[in-house]
Image (spheres, rainbow, N blue to C red):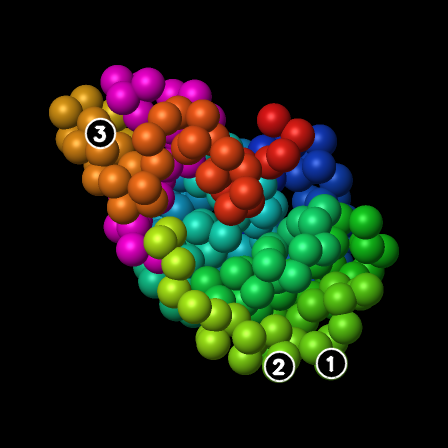
Amino acid sequence: MSVITIVLADDHHIVRQGVRALLESDPDFSIIGEAGDGLKVIDLVAHLKPWVLVVDLMMPGLNGLEVTRQVTKISPATRVIILSMYTNESYVMEALRNGALGYVLKESDPSDLMHAIREVAMGHHYLSPPLSEHAVEAYIEKAKDATLDLYDTLTTREKEVLQLTAEGYSNTEIADRLSISPRTAETHRANMTRKLKLHTQTDLIKYALKRGIIPMED
């Protein structure tokens, strides 16, 4: 197998450096880029076209699940592994439904991530123990059969605005982050809240927490 090019995405610099050190100990892996913000990951992958993207589930700017969905569209050859501390079946299903091939728990043995990278590089699905590898097909089938929810009616831009709004950014700040006008940001926010039937900022934050868009710790 050729050297596997990898982009790492985690908002914790220490974690990112630890993963980099681990992977660079293997001559089969080459880290070609890093990012600590979900929105920056999209641009980085579009530019570098890595073989594998390892992305944290909870990222500022854009969460790992939405990053996965966008990456699979802009760089179909890039295989995505979600790195997560959550074992929730809903997260695993959403990751697979959005196009991720791997889901690795942060509490796993370091060798587990290295194994996962090799598996997804060959186009195989990989779920980290205690998530049973034998359950992959079941997860995928359940993900495919999952009922369409209101979140799926949002555009890519509306999903970005949703996360940034939940993180406390104003329309002006969102406009700056996304390189759009404040008026456009306001329009996207209005459309997003209408589609999700949300009426207040509190409703929006509760929705984002429940949907796993922002971490419960925050």
62 sits to left or right of 4: left
Q: Quadrant of the C terminus?
A: top right
Q: Which secondary structure, mark 2?
A: helix
Q: Which secondary structure, mark 3?
A: helix
Q: Is residue 15 above or below residue 175?
A: below
Q: Residue at x 70, y 77 (%)?
A: 135
Q: What amino acid does circle 3 point to? A: Ala
173 in magenta: yes
200 in magenta: no
Q: Which residue is mark 1?
A: 134
Assess whether mark 1 and mark 2 are in contact (beta carbons under 8 angstroms).
yes
Q: Residues within 10 Å of mark 1 (few under 14, many from 20)?
A: few
155 sits to left or right of 8: left
Of mark 2 and mark 3, the one earlier in the sequence is 2
Instruction: Kindly indicate the quadrant of the structure image that contains residue 72.
Output: bottom left
Assess whether mark 3 and mark 2 are in contact (beta carbons under 8 angstroms).
no
Q: What amino acid does circle 1 point to? A: His
Q: Nearer the viewer, residue 45 or 82?
A: 82
Q: How many marks?
A: 3
Q: Which secondary structure, mark 1?
A: helix
Q: Residues within 10 Å of mark 3 (few under 14, many from 20)?
A: many
Q: Residue at x 60, y 36 (%)?
A: 215
Q: What residue range appears in magenta?
A: 152-174
Q: Is residue 123 visible?
A: no
Q: Which residue is mark 2?
A: 137
Q: Which residue is mark 3?
A: 185
Q: Where is residue 209 drawn, in percent x and y?
A: 54, 38
- Report the predominant secondary structure element of the magenta stretch: helix
Q: Residue furthest right?
A: 109
